[in-house]
Image (tube, helix red, strand yellow):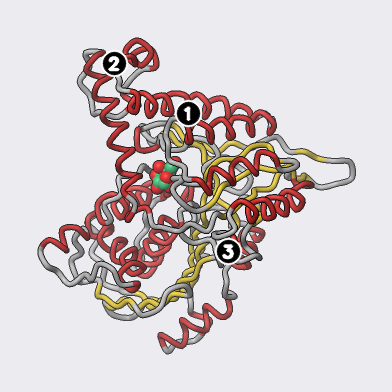
């Protein structure tokens, strides 16, 4: 990881790196110098919203903010964790066989469903579940302290995948397991799809594990092939290469985990229903996901879909096109065009995928009017959290303050609950997750 990314990622934590190391050293009774650190960044998805679970192609990037996990191997099978955000301690043994949460509940196992401890601890247990499912026999637990960037958790930046990956990397490191990013993408999928029961795609974990500073990560969620796209460098006279954009995150104040919101899985089911009808009409037998339907087949048979399903399918096919055009625009450094596509993607999320909510739609509309903004859309699933925008670097501050003012006028009840320091955050792109 570049020095730049380490500095930024660690600066982003609400508690300094030194303090995290000290807490872990005290928890484990070891020297500060032996504490290891995982940095796991949050991600954005400029184009390719809600098509990963259908095998579409998505674009993603990490930002210079995220999760820091300080840890040491515990010397035995015990895992002991504390959090900078949540109260209580999570304690379990890596010898314990983990089962998906819903299965555990139905057999009356001892997972309490609604305590704070359970919610944040379930990602660590999910990581153990995934590693066990992959045939790994862990001997070594970890003692750790986890902490995310102030105000940015549960905000559509995929803090859940960042947390899951942080635990995977720490457990692997403590057990001397060498696991490739591709395998970890699959392990994190097991945490989310199987352990937690969210039917999401592999966008989040691919972004977090594969991204590289300044590049757009392109992931074909069907073939699982990816590539990194660099925009051309802009070098001004007598100056170093300059990144001409900043990433703006505008927070709504709405927080609710995707796993507890039925909206996400309902949309996935609708996409599958649309795919089933289109595949049948085309006389094809395949898994009912929209990437198994060719564009021409969609055009020929879309009239067979009920209006709701037709809108979901329209989002999928139009978003796939926007991703293709967007990758090209990014590769040429055409941020104006890239931004227009992001805003069109945002509109399709509102009109076709119907996943927004009033505060997020308001933020989207405010961002589109803000100075220097290339384009904006909901970040993540769009049911809560924040909107993301690409903005001309020189206009970022101005745009941020306009968004903050306008949003507080439109949402006088929600906006005051936001920390004014982090209501709108200006950031840069980041690197991939790793042990540093
Ligand atoms: C969430 C899911 C992802 C993806 C996005 C929407 O972040 O976890 O898999 O579907 O929503 O693009």
- List the residue tagged with mark 2: 304
- List the residue tagged with mark 3: 418
Q: How crowded is mark 1: few (under 14 residues within 10 Å), some or many (20 or more)?
A: many
Mark toward the start of the polypeptide (1 vs 2):
2
Question: Residue 359 placed where, x, y %?
Answer: 53, 49
Question: Residue 152 placed where, x, y %?
Answer: 53, 61
* Residue in the picture at 52% in, 58% down: 253
Look at the numbered disc 3 and give the secondary structure of its residue: loop
Kindly tell me whether residue 203 is visible in this rendering: no
Task: Give the mark toward the camera: 1 or 2.
Answer: 2
Look at the numbered disc 2 and give the secondary structure of its residue: helix
* Residue in the picture at 48% in, 35% down: 350
Q: Is residue 327 left or right of residue 50?
A: right
Residue lying at the far top of the rendered structure? 300
Determine if the C-beta at disc 2 is less than 8 A from ligand 1. no
Kindly tell me whether residue 193 is visible in this rendering: yes
Q: Label 1, label 2: how many angstroms apart (C-alpha)? A: 21 Å
- List the residue tagged with mark 1: 319
Q: Do the residues labelled 3 and 1 touch (CB within 8 Å)?
A: no
Q: In this view, does 308 lie to the left or right of 133?
A: right
Residue lying at the far left of the rendered structure? 107
Task: Give the mark toward the camera: 3 or 1.
Answer: 3
Query: In front: 161, or 281?
Result: 281
């Amino acid at each position: 990881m570049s020095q730049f990314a380490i500095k930024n990622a660690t600066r982003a934590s609400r508690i300094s790196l030194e303090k995290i190391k000290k807490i872990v050293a005290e928890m484990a009774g070891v020297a500060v110098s032996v504490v290891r650190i995982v940095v796991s960044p949050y991600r954005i998805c400029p184009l390719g919203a809600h098509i990963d679970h259908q095998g579409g192609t998505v674009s993603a990037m990490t930002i210079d903010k995220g999760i820091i996990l300080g840890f040491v191997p515990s010397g035995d099978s015990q895992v002991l964790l504390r959090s900078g955000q949540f109260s209580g301690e999570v304690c379990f043994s890596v010898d314990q066989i983990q089962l998906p949460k819903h299965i555990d509940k139905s057999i009356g196992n001892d997972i309490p469903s609604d305590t704070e401890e359970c919610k944040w601890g379930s990602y660590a247990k999910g990581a153990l579940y995934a590693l066990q499912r992959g045939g790994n026999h862990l001997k070594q637990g970890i003692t750790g302290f986890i902490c995310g960037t102030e105000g940015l958790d549960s905000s559509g930046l995929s803090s859940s995948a960042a947390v899951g990956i942080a635990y995977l990397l720490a457990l692997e490191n403590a057990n001397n397991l060498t696991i490739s990013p591709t395998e970890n993408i699959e392990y994190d999928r097991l945490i989310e799809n199987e352990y937690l029961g969210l039917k999401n795609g592999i966008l989040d974990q691919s972004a977090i594990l594969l991204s590289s500073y300044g590049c757009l990560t392109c992931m074909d969620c069907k073939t699982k092939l990816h590539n990194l796209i660099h925009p051309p460098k802009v070098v001004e006279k007598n100056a170093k290469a300059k990144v001409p954009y900043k990433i703006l995150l505008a927070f709504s104040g709405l927080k609710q985990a995707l796993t507890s919101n039925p909206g996400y899985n309902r949309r996935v089911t609708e996409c599958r229903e649309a795919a089933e009808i289109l595949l049948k009409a085309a006389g094809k037998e395949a898994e009912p996901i929209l990437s198994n339907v060719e564009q021409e087949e969609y055009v020929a048979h879309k009239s067979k879909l009920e209006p709701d399903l037709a809108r979901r399918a329209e989002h999928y096919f139009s978003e796939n096109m926007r991703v293709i055009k967007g990758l090209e625009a990014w590769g040429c450094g055409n941020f104006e065009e890239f931004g227009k596509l992001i805003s069109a993607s945002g509109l399709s999320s509102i009109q076709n995928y119907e996943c927004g909510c009033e505060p997020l739609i308001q933020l989207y509309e405010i961002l589109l009017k803000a100075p220097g903004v290339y384009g904006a859309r909901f970040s993540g699933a769009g049911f809560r959290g924040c909107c993301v925008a690409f903005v001309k670097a020189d206009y970022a501050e101005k745009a941020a303050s306009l968004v903050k003012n306008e949003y507080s006028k439109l949402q006088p009840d929600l906006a005051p609950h936001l920390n004014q320091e982090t209501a709108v955050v200006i950031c840069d792109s980041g690197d991939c997750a790793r042990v540093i």
